[in-house]
């Protein structure tokens, strides 16, 4: 393909075939936001049902489906894709790269995620969504009637494959594509934490792949891994799920930590305190994240020694996390703090997340865990770490990088209203749930009896959820009303420190006309104070090589989507669909393998024209 | 990504340098020796089971050690993990092994049948 | 881009890592293998956890047949060696050698797969169906996943052999052959553990 041809695609075809990390990032953000709204709606419906004792707003079966889909959607289809969106857009810019290492696979990862997400949600219209909780414990899940759980298994399998591919892509990008001078220990913290999160993806998702494979074989082909009467064992699933599931929560929280580590120094106008300690703390959290999964299974009966080992390992995670908290506080200390919306989210994160961390240590106490297990105390804990950590991180990152990604700043006034409503709503919803759990309300129940002291706190919790819902609507409105706040300077926040603030808005498709030369941590900050405020170039202006777009990732993902229906309706004699789907996928893989694709070059004249337009 | 001026579809021509040739010859010798050694290890493992003279309490750890040696040979001699510039690949493979060990151990032992 | 091109390139010492694309592929594929380690660990763990669950069906010592497994092991080990020779040919710039050795690797792979299918059919006749017991499900899933990897490897290498039968060694296909060989070695690595842990320990205890 030539440069002219690459420029003349229709908009739809361009987005379907794009391999540009920026466009893929935006697609992740849009799809993730959609699923986030969907998961939020599911949560609101559940909270309405629990507003009053023995309320009959929803049937219990629907409630079970909602709670399963809320958890699954929020983890796999909202939080992770939203983080992937930011990672996709920002990481190459932060390391001074023109693209990711595998643009084609990057696009494949996105389409697999999207088709997996759509597949999972189709279950609503085909006789019932999955209803065994997001953890899908066997034998509840292996014996669950209907096709809901089959959609769960295949939807997650397809989207999980996409995540794994994305993880490998980020790892290789960060290792191989850094600009000259950008050593590992000069990388911005967001890139670092995404790097560690990608490592966790690489090693955690295969366990889920196998868990889902076993569950599929059990449900669709009659295997007997989990059937106790055939010599099977149900704990196998719990181990496989949590060997994946525990690292998964670190996959979510580490990039969020990274976002805060970018935002706090920018708005405190100070270098991040303890950079290397931050890096090592991230690595240690990543490692320990793999060695603690059995703390989800304290009540299974593994025995006191096994429980104690996992309890101690779990508590140890508090140490590197504490290091991080103190580093953020010390970054703020003595800084000239600007209370932008992005920074407000970062500041609110610190106490909120610490509360979730404290209940985490409580839960890690394996003896006390017998009391907390499967109560609302657990629900409160993980919402404190996931909303207080990941969701605040996502909003923080959204406000911070919005002008970089979309070319306009989000309205600060609406932003602050949104922030306060959301924060108050969040604490209102989940703070009382600690006590609901301690006085004995089990999680995942569709209703509760009157006169047990649960009424008031459940009502308060529901009000909080409404508040969060209203706040989110304000955020969505502000996305549209802020469009007039166009930005046209690279360093939008004036105090930008990293490379993504050195390039024009909107970001040119080749990112950097000349690869920058990195001379220190926080390269832009360094040039502002030691140089002339502009990045030095590491290469002369020249033609820029770009990868060609391709529709094959879309086709491959579509093939697996079709094949999934073959497996889901295997019992109904639709296995042919699986064969057709797999043929589509493997055919597309074959085409990709056989047809060499060497991309095209953007001529240097075009780049010079762009530079003139920007007046540089 | 194609660097400018290099056609990635053009056939590679020319001979490898003398140094490379010597290195390749050495490499091939090491690989052949390793292969023979692997054949030997495999046979040992099979014999230790096939002959009933060896108690399984000894044979099992013995077989496992042989398997580990063989895998290390595969990784370092056949797959060239020992070459310079393979720091990251080594790191990732060994991290994978590090995570694989507790995974296998837990699935074997922590199934609620024996209480530890 | 025709005006910039040179029509042949000199052979670098490591043609698989001579371009950035090659370097990326090399590293990314190794990382994938790191992930596969955990994937197979999960399957091994499942098998080891469930191997006692016979449900009255046949167990390892009733089924496994040492000579057959020994032959299969030798075949796969030899195919590992032939793929090593392919890489040596590649570094020597001898593309015919690459194709020849890879073809031999594929033939050995097909032979291995044939034995495995024969083996599964035999076990089925002994009364070990996929759904017979937890042991049978776990056994077929573990060994079957390995077999599926072998099959994928055969298809992959065959595609490369057909696609590049006339092209000569290039900077584009060198990393492709190299990663395929890495994959093939990894299959052998997994098999080393399968014959040790599943077959030998199954018969021995």
Image (cartoon, coloured by chain):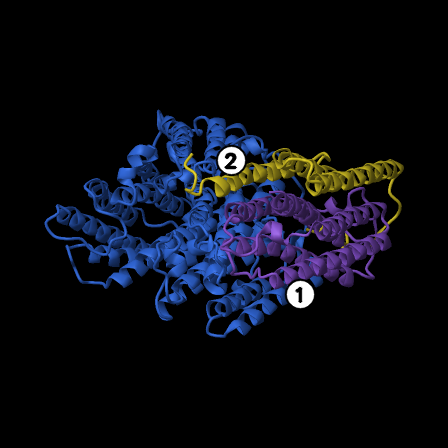
Chain colours: A blue, B yellow, C purple
As helix, strand or loop, the secondary structure at mark 2 comes to helix
**Along the line of sight, which residue is nearer the eye, C100 or B5?**
C100
Residue B54: x, y in percent? 68, 35
Left or right: B63 with respect to C171?
left
Answer above or below: position of A219 versus A523.
below
Picture quarter containing residue A595? bottom right
Q: How many marks?
A: 2
Q: Which residue is mark 2?
A: A524
Residue A303: x, y in percent? 39, 35
Residue A515: x, y in percent? 61, 42
As helix, strand or loop, the secondary structure at mark 1 comes to helix
Answer above or below: position of C109 versus B34.
below
Could you tell me which chain the residue with mark 2 belongs to? A
Q: Crowding at label 2, few (<14), some or many (≥20) Cα neighbours within 10 Å?
A: many
Q: Which residue is mark 1?
A: A591
Could you tell me which chain the residue with mark 1 belongs to? A
**Along the line of sight, which residue is nearer the eye, A3 or C75?**
C75
Answer above or below: position of C85 versus A142.
above
Q: Crowding at label 1, few (<14), some or many (≥20) Cα neighbours within 10 Å?
A: few
């Amino acid at each position: 393909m030539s440069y002219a041809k690459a420029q003349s695609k229709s908009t739809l075809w361009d987005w379907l075939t794009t391999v540009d990390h920026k466009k893929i990032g935006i697609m992740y953000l849009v799809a993730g936001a959609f699923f986030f709204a969907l998961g939020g709606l599911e949560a609101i419906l559940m909270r309405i049902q629990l507003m009053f004792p023995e309320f009959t707003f929803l049937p219990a079966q629907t409630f079970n489906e909602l709670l399963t889909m809320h958890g699954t959607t929020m983890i796999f289809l909202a939080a992770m894709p939203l983080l992937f969106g930011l990672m996709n857009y920002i990481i190459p810019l932060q390391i001074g790269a023109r693209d990711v290492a595998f643009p084609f696979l990057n696009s494949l990862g996105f389409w697999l995620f999207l088709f997996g997400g759509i597949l999972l949600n189709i279950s609503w219209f085909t006789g019932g969504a999955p209803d065994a909780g997001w953890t899908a414990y066997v034998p509840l899940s292996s014996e669950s009637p209907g096709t809901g759980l089959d959609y769960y298994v295949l939807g997650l399998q397809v989207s999980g494959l996409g995540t794994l591919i994305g993880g490998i892509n980020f790892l290789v990008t960060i290792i191989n594509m850094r600009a000259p001078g950008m050593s590992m220990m000069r990388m911005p913290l967001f890139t670092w934490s995404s790097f560690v999160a990608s490592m966790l993806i690489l090693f955690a998702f295969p366990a889920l792949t196998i868990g889902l494979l076993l569950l599929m074989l059990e449900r669709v082909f009659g295997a007997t891994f989990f059937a106790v009467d055939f010599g099977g064992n149900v704990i196998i699933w719990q181990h496989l799920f949590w060997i994946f599931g525990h690292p998964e929560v670190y996959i979510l929280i580490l990039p969020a930590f990274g976002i805060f580590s970018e935002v706090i120094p920018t708005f405190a106008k100070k270098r991040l305190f303890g950079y290397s300690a931050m890096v090592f703390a991230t690595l240690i959290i990543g490692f320990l994240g793999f060695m603690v999964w059995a703390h989800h299974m304290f009540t299974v009966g593994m025995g006191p020694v096994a429980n104690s080992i996992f309890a101690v390992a779990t508590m140890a995670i508090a140490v590197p996390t504490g290091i991080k908290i103190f580093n953020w506080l010390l970054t703020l200390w003595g800084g000239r703090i600007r209370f932008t919306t992005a920074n407000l989210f970062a500041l609110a994160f610190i106490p909120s997340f610490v509360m979730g961390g404290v209940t985490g240590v409580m839960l890690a106490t394996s003896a006390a865990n017998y009391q907390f297990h499967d109560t609302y105390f657990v629900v409160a804990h993980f919402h404190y770490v996931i909303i207080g950590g990941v969701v605040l991180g996502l909003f923080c990152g959204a406000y911070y990088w919005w002008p970089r990604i979309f070319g306009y700043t989000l309205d600060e006034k609406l932003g602050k209203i949104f922030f306060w409503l959301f924060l108050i709503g969040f604490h209102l919803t989940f703070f009382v749930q600690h006590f609901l759990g301690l006085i004995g309300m089990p999680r995942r129940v569709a209703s509760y009896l009157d006169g047990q002291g649960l009424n008031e706190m459940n009502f308060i919790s529901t009000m909080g959820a409404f508040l969060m819902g209203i706040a989110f609507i304000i955020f969505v409105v502000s996305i549209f009303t802020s469009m007039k706040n166009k930005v046209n300077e690279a360093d939008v926040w004036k105090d930008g420190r990293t490379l993504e603030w050195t390039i024009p808005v909107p970001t040119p498709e080749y990112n950097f006309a000349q690869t920058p030369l990195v001379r220190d941590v926080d390269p832009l900050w360094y040039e502002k104070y030691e140089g002339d405020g502009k990045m030095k170039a590491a290469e002369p202006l020249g033609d820029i090589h770009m990868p060609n777009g391709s529709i094959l990732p879309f086709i491959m993902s579509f093939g697996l989507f079709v094949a999934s229906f073959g497996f889901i309706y295997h019992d109904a004699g639709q296995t042919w669909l699986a064969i057709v789907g797999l043929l589509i996928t493997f055919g597309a893989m074959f085409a990709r393998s056989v047809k060499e694709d060497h991309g095209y070059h953007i001529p240097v004249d075009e780049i010079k024209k762009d530079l003139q337009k920007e007046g540089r | 990504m194609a660097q400018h001026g290099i056609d990635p579809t053009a056939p590679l021509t020319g001979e490898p340098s003398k140094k490379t040739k010597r290195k390749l010859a050495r490499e091939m010798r090491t690989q052949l020796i390793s292969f023979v050694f692997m054949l030997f290890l495999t046979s040992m493992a099979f014999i230790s089971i096939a002959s009933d003279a060896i108690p399984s309490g000894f044979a099992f750890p013995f077989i496992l050690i042989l398997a580990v040696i063989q895998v290390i040979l595969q990784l370092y001699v056949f797959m060239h993990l020992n070459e310079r510039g393979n720091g990251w690949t080594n790191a990732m493979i060994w991290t994978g092994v590090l995570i694989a060990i507790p995974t296998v151990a837990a699935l074997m032992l922590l199934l609620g049948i024996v209480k530890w | 881009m025709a005006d910039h091109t040179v029509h042949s390139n000199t052979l670098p010492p490591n043609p698989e890592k001579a371009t950035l694309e090659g370097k990326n592929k090399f590293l990314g594929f190794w990382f994938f293998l790191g992930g596969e380690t955990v994937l197979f660990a999960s399957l091994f763990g499942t098998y080891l956890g469930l191997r006692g669950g016979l449900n009255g069906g046949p167990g390892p010592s009733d089924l496994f047949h040492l000579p057959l497994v020994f032959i299969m092991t030798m075949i796969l080990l030899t195919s590992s060696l032939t793929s090593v020779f392919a890489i040596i040919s590649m570094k020597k710039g001898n593309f015919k050698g690459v194709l020849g050795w890879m073809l031999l690797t594929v033939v050995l792979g097909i032979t291995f797969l044939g034995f495995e299918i024969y083996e599964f059919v035999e076990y089925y006749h002994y009364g070990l169906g996929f759904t017979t017991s937890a042991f049978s499900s776990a056994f077929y899933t573990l060994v079957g996943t390995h077999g599926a990897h072998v099959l994928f490897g055969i298809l992959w290498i065959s595609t490369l052999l057909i696609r590049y039968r006339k092209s000569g060694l290039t900077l584009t296909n060198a990393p492709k052959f190299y990663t395929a060989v890495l994959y093939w070695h990894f299959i052998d690595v997994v098999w080393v553990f399968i014959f040790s842990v599943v077959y030998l320990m199954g018969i021995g205890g």
